[in-house]
């Protein structure tokens, strides 16, 4: 992940959240001009039913309200863009927020259905985790996935999160609470995984007796 200085813009001028860049993605604070793309992809029952706070149906006005709240809230919300020759394409959201009663920030994310299955959620989530552990004072991150959401569980596991319990989470789009698995990642585990990733595999040879 590379952290680059944010380009000037009305919302970014007030924000100290940087722009993050990975091999395929750029992550930045959502801006009002992203509202239509956010609403287009968020207006999907399959997404709303897996996330706590997304309304369904999701209208352009919901996108605008979210962007305004995101810039005013204490949480960190990144709009995620896929780099393309024709210019960046909005693909989803990934962010951190502290839930009531918790001290550690919780990761939340959703990606537009056309972009599923290409490792993009994992790439974006890793960038946000790297950001959290290098640019904020978080020493532990939380995650949660509905028990019926193996793809999200897998994203958390691929990012090093470990299961730490079960619970219930209210899903706005369902108007009900549903069972979730809870996960956590502590900073020392993250540091160890990052260091492991930069080492070569051991050389192997046959031992002769
Ligand atoms: C969950 C979500 C973010 C995954 O996005 P994605 O870009 O497809 O994720 P990735 O490609 O990085 O990784 C998905 C992993 O889940 C696996 N997976 C997908 N569907 C699966 C299933 N039904 N059972 C088991 N594993 C599954 C994939 O194989 C992949 O793992 P792998 O790399 O080991 O093969 C996306 O589907 C989404 O936005 N869903 C709706 C909203 C949501 O669930 N948000 C999370 C709330 S906790």
Image: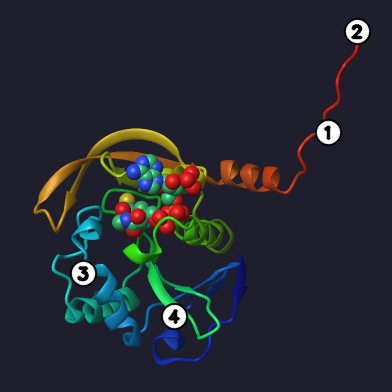
Q: Earlier in the sequence, mark 3 or mark 4?
A: 4
Disc 2 residue crowd, few under 14, some 14–19, many 20+, Cα 10 Å: few
> Gap between marks 3 and 4, in whole Å?
27 Å
Residue 185 vs 175, above or below: the answer is above
Using the image as rendered, state which of residue 172 and residue 100 is in the foreground: 172
Identify the mark at residue 203; answer none if there is no mark: 1
Disc 4 residue crowd, few under 14, some 14–19, many 20+, Cα 10 Å: some
Helix, strand or loop at mark 2 = loop
Residue 87 vs 167, above or below: the answer is below
Q: Nearer the viewer, mark 3 or mark 4?
A: 3
| Residue, disc 2 | 209
- At 56% from the left and 64% from the top, the residue drawn is 135
Disc 1 residue crowd, few under 14, some 14–19, many 20+, Cα 10 Å: few
> Gap between marks 1 and 4, in whole Å?
48 Å
> Gap between marks 3 and 1, in whole Å?
50 Å
Q: Nearer the viewer, mark 4 or mark 2?
A: 2
Identify the mark at residue 120; answer none if there is no mark: none
Percent x, y of residue 131: 54, 62
Q: Which quadrant is home to the C terminus? A: top right
- At 23% from the left and 57% from the top, the residue drawn is 46
Q: Nearer the viewer, mark 1 or mark 4?
A: 1
Percent x, y of residue 150: 34, 42
Q: Earlier in the sequence, mark 1 or mark 4?
A: 4
């Amino acid at each position: 992940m590379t952290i680059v200085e944010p380009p000037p813009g009305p919302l970014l001028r007030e924000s100290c959240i940087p722009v993050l860049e990975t091999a395929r993605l750029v992550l930045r604070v959502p801006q009002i001009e992203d509202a239509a793309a956010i609403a287009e992809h968020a207006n999907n029952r399959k997404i709303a039913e897996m996330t706590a706070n997304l309304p369904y149906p999701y209208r352009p006005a919901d996108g605008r309200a979210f962007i305004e709240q995101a810039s005013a809230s204490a949480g960190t919300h990144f709009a995620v863009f896929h780099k393309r020759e024709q210019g960046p394409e909005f693909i989803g959201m990934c962010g951190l927020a502290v839930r009531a009663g918790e001290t550690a920030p919780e990761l939340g994310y959703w990606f537009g259905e056309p972009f599923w299955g290409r490792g993009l959620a994992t790439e974006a989530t890793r960038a946000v985790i790297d950001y959290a552990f290098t640019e904020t004072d978080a020493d532990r991150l939380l995650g949660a996935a509905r028990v019926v959401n193996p793809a999200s569980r897998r994203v958390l596991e691929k990012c090093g999160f470990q299961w730490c319990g079960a619970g219930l989470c209210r899903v706005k789009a369902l108007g009900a609470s549903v069972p979730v698995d809870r996960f956590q990642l502590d900073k020392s585990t993250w540091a160890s995984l990052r260091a492991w990733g930069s080492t070569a595999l051991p050389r192997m040879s046959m031992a002769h007796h």
